[in-house]
C-alpha cells in the first residue's frame, strides 16, 4: 500500500497537503546541498497507521514532520523511531497551538522544534545532523554560513 | 499483553500516572451514577501501539482521554475509533499547551474537549452521551442538576 | 412564539447570523450522512429566554452551539438540557476569547468543545454520539474515515 | 423560592461560594460608605433560572457579578436587566479565561469589567454610578480619593 | 485654552484621531437615544494636562475613554474624576495590550471596561448608568433590547 | 507639599509601596556605583498631580518608574519630562499586563522598558545613560561587566 | 572589512534588511533633529562577529537595535558595550516573540525596549539620552512635545 | 583562559548556574547511556566571547544550550558552529519568553528546541543524533523506549 523503497537520507512528512509551501522550502535546501530527501503526506489523525508504516519502513536517517493546529504528527513520528525528528509548526489562526503542541513533548520522546513555518531551518538542522558523520557536508554548511554573512554585508550597503 | 475483556461502558485512558487525580474525579462520577467505567494508563508517545490496541479492542461506547503538555493522547484515541472521545487537558506550567493541543484538532477527527483538569465534567458528558439512548440515565442526570441547583441556594444562605 | 415542532436529531444554534459559515459546514456533514439537523439563531445575551425555550422544547438528541467573543451560548444551552452539547468557538480578533469562554466550563455542566470554526468536526462528533446507539451510522462514519485516509494517500502523490 | 424583598441599592451575585473573598472586598467598601448592598450566590450554568429570577425581581440600581473560569454570570445578569452590570473576573489557573469571557461581550449587552479579583473596584464603580444622582455620595467618593492620596504620601516617607 | 462650556451628559475622549471609528459607533447610539454627547481628542501621553483640564471642567455625568496600545487614557480620566469612566480598548497588532492596560486598574480607581472596539457597548453602558435616575431612558433601553431580540428571530428565519 | 530639593542624579518612583523590593534592587546598584539616587512613592492613578509635580520639580537626569498591573506610571512620568524614563514592570497574577502597558507606548513619548521585576537592570541602564557624558562612570560599568564575566567562569567550575 | 570611521552619535543596527521600514522611522526623527545617525545591517545569528566588531569600533554614544522573531540582536549589542542600547521589536506572525526576547534580558545587561515597530520612539529615547548632556537638544525635544500637543488639539476639532 | 581539552561527545552549556537542575537531568541520561558529556556555564549576554571560544574550541559533535528569560544562548551557540544545537527553555515567571526566544530562530541558523525544562529530552535527542552513525547507540535507545513502554503498562496496573 505504501511505496516500498524509501532510500532518501531525510524523509519529510506533511500533515496535510496545505503544508506544502513549508515543505518546499525544506526541499529547496536539500536540493541545493545535493542531499536526497523525499516528501510525503501522512496525517497523524486521519492516517495513523500510515504514519507508523512510513516511519518504520523508511531508511531515512532524519525525519522532518510539518504540521499545524493540534500538531500531533511530529510526536507520532518520534514515537515510531529513534531517529532524530525535527518538528515544524505551521502558522494559522492561533500559531501558539502548533508551536506548543510540538515543542512541549513529554519526557522520553523528544522532538527538535524549529520556528513557525521554518521549513528551511528544519532542512538545515537535518543537514547538520547528517554532517556529524560527514565532514564534506559540514564544509558545505560552513560555506553556506559564510555566504549568508556576505549577504548581510551586502544588505547593509543597500540600506544607506 | 493487554487485558482481554474490556466490558465497561466508558474507558478512561490516562497519558501518565501523574494524571490520576483528574481520572479519579471522573471515576467518582461514574460510581455515583452506577455506570461501569475502567481506567488505564497508555501514552500516545511512549506506547502508541498500546493506545491503538486498547481502543480497537475495547467495547466501550465512550472514551475519555486525559493528558497534559503536548497532549496527543485524545487525538490518538479519536483517530482509532468512531466512538465519541472526550479530551481532558491537564494543568502544568503553561496550561495553554494541553488545552490547545487537544481542542484544535484538524477537520475530520473530532475530540470534545472539556476544561482544564475537569475530570468530573468529562464523566458527566460521557453520561449525557450514554443517556441519549438511556432515559433512566437521563432522569438521573436531571436529578443531579437539581441537586446542584439546591446546593447553590444553600451556599447563598451561607454567604450572608 | 417559537416554531412548535422540532424533530431533527441535532439542533444547531448560532449565536449570531455572522456565524452562518461555520454552521453551514456542520449542515453539509449532516446532509452527507442523511441525518436530520436544523439550524437556528438565538443569542445567549440578546435572547436568553429564546435559547431556553428552544432547547427545552426541542426533541433533538444532540445540540451544537456556535459562538464567538465572550461565547456564553454553548454554556447556556448546556445549562438548559442534559443532552450532550458541542460548542464551536468562532474566530475573531482574539480567538482565545471564544475558545476559553467555551472550554473552561465550571464543574457540573460540561460542554464538549471542538476547534476554532470547526463546524464540520462538531457535526462529526454529533454523529459519533448518535452512532453509539445506531450501528448503521457507525458504519458510515468508519467509511468516511477510510475515505479521508484514501484522500491523504492521493494528496501524497500530488506533492511529489 | 427566592427571598422576596430585595431592597439594597446594589446586588452582588457570586457565581460560586468560592468567589466569596472577592465579594467580601466589595461588601467592605459598601459598609464603609453606608450604602446598602446584598450578596447572593447564583450560578449562570447550574441555576440559570435563579439568576434570571433574582435579577428580574431585584430593585437594585446596580448589579455586580463575580465569576471565574468561563465566566458567563456577568453576561447572564446583563441580559436580564438594563441596569448597569459590573463584572469581576476571578483568578484561577489561566486568568485570561475569566477576563476575556467577561470583557468581550458582543454588541448590545454591555458589562463594565474591572480587574482580576478587584471586588473593591467593582464596589467603587457601583458607588460612582449611584453618585451620578447623589451629590452626597460624590462628596464621600472625593474624600476617599483624597485619603488614598494622603496614604501614598505617607507610604513615600516609609520607603526612604 | 479648552472649550469652556461642556454641557453634554456624556463626554467621549479619544486617545488619538485614529480611534474615531470606535467613537462614532458610540455617537450613533447617543444620537439614536436622543442623549447629548460630545467627542474630543486628548492623549494621556502627549497632552496629560489637557486630559485633566477637560475632565475637571466637564459637567458630564459619564465619561467614555477610547484608546489602543498602552492605553493609559481611561485610567487617566478615572484618576481625575469620581464620575463613572468606561474604557474601550482599541484593536491593533497585539490586542491584549489595550485590553489589559485598561481592565487591570489597581485598587481605588476603577474603570468599567467593555470589549475590543466596542464603542456601541460603551454608549449603551453609559445610557444604563444615566437611566439609574431616568426611568424614561430605562424604558427606551428596554425597547432597544426587545428590538434586538426581534432581529435575532428575523435572522433565524434567514439562515434556513 | 512635596519635598523641595531633589538633587539626586536618578529619581526612582514606585507606583505603590508593594513595589519596594524591586526599587531596592535598583538602589543597591546606585549605592555600589556611588551615584546619588532617591526613591519615592507616587501613583499615576491615585496621585496623578503628585507624579507631575515630582517629575516637573526634579533635577534628576534619569527617571525610573516601577509599577505593576495596568502600569500607567512610567508613561505618566514620560509625558511630564523629556528626560529618559526607564519603566520596570512588576510581576503579579498575569505579568503580561504590566509588561505590555509599559512597553507598548504610543508614538512620541518613549519609555525604555526593562524585564519583569528587573530593578537592577533599570539602575544599570540609568548608569549607562549618565555615563554617556561621564567617562569615569563608563569605566566602572566596564569593570562591573568584567566582574560579572569572572563570576560566570567561577560558576562554571562549581557545576562540574 | 567594516567601514572604518563611525562618527555618528547614534548607530542603528537592523537584524535584517526587512526591518528597514522601522529603521527609517528612526532616521527621519534624527534628520528632523539634526543629529547624526547611521544605519547598518548586522545579524546576531548570521554575523555575530560583525555585530561585535561594529559595536566595539563605533564611537556612537547610543545604539538602537531593531529585530524580529527570536530577537537576539539588541542583547548581543548590549553585551558588547556599556553604551545605552535601545531595542525595537519588529512585528510578525506572533509579536510576543520579539517583544519578550528583547525586554526579558537577564540581570546585568539591560536593554531599554520600546513598543512593537516603534522606530520613532527609539530615536526619541536616544535623543533624550543625548539631551541629558545637551541642553540645546533638550529644548528641541520640549518644542517637539508642544507641537505634538498642538496637533492633538487640532485633531480634536476635526472629529466634531 | 578556557579549559583546553574538550573531548566529550556532547557539550552542555548553561546560561546561568540557576539552570543546573535542568542540566543535571541531561547529564543523568548521558551517564545512563555511557556517553561522554561535559557541562559548563557561559552566558550569551555576560560572556559572549566565552560562548564563542567554548563552542569554537570544542570537539563536541552536539551542543545543548539551556537558558531562561530572553534566552539568547542557544542561538549564540548555533551561530558559532554548524554542529546541531539543541535548545532547552527554562521555566520562570512567564515561560513563553524562553520558549519563543529559542524556537523562533530566523532563517539560516536553526536550533532544535525541546520542551520547558526538558533536560532529559535534550539529552535523548543528542543521543539520537549521535546514533545516526552509531548503531550500538541506536539499539540502546530502542531498549530505552521498550523500558519506558513497560513502565507505562506497570503504571496502568497501579491505577486500578
Image (cartoon, coloured by chain):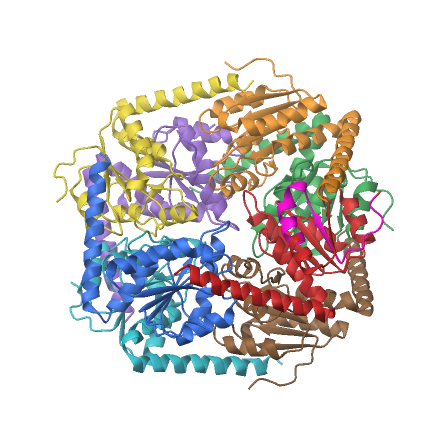
Chain colours: A cyan, B yellow, C purple, D orange, E green, F red, G brown, H blue
Quadrant position of residue A15: bottom left
Measured as percent of width and height from the top left, residue C5 is found at 37, 29
Measured as percent of width and height from the top left, residue F85 is found at 70, 57
Quadrant position of residue D141: top right
Measured as percent of width and height from the top left, residue E150 is found at 54, 34
Q: Which residues are magenta?
A: F2-27
F18 magenta-colored: yes
Observer able to see residue C8? no
- Choose between G8 and C153: the one closer to the eye: G8
x 56%, y 40%: residue: D105
Measured as percent of width and height from the top left, residue B114 is found at 37, 39
Location of residue H20 with respect to G130 vertically, above or below: above
Location of residue F63 with respect to D15 vertically, above or below: below
Location of residue A6 with respect to F109 vertically, above or below: below
Left or right of F122, for residue D69: left
- Choose between D86 and H158: the one closer to the eye: H158
Observer able to see residue C153? yes
The total number of labels drawn is 0
Q: Looking at the figure, which quarter contains the C terminus of chain D?
A: top right
Left or right of C121, for residue E54: right
E142 magenta-colored: no
- Choose between B133 and A117: the one closer to the eye: A117
- Choose between G10 and E70: the one closer to the eye: G10
Amino acid at each position: 500500500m505504501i511505496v516500498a523503497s524509501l532510500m532518501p537520507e531525510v524523509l519529510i512528512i506533511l500533515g496535510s497537503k496545505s503544508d506544502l509551501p513549508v515543505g518546499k522550502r525544506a526541499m529547496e535546501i536539500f536540493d541545493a546541498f545535493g542531499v536526497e530527501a523525499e516528501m510525503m503526506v501522512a496525517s497523524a489523525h486521519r492516517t495513523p497507521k500510515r504514519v507508523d508504516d512510513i516511519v518504520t519502513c523508511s531508511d531515512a536517517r532524519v525525519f522532518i514532520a510539518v504540521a499545524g493546529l493540534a500538531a500531533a504528527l511530529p510526536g507520532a513520528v518520534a514515537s515510531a523511531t529513534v531517529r532524530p525528528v525535527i518538528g515544524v509548526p505551521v502558522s494559522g489562526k492561533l500559531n501558539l497551538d502548533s508551536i506548543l503542541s510540538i515543542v512541549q513533548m513529554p519526557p522520553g520522546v523528544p522532538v527538535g522544534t524549529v520556528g513557525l513555518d521554518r521549513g528551511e531551518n528544519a532542512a538545515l538542522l537535518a543537514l547538520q545532523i547528517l554532517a556529524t558523520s560527514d565532514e564534506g557536508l559540514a564544509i558545505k554548511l560552513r560555506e553556506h554560513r559564510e555566504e549568508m554573512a556576505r549577504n548581510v554585508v551586502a544588505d547593509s550597503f543597500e540600506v544607506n
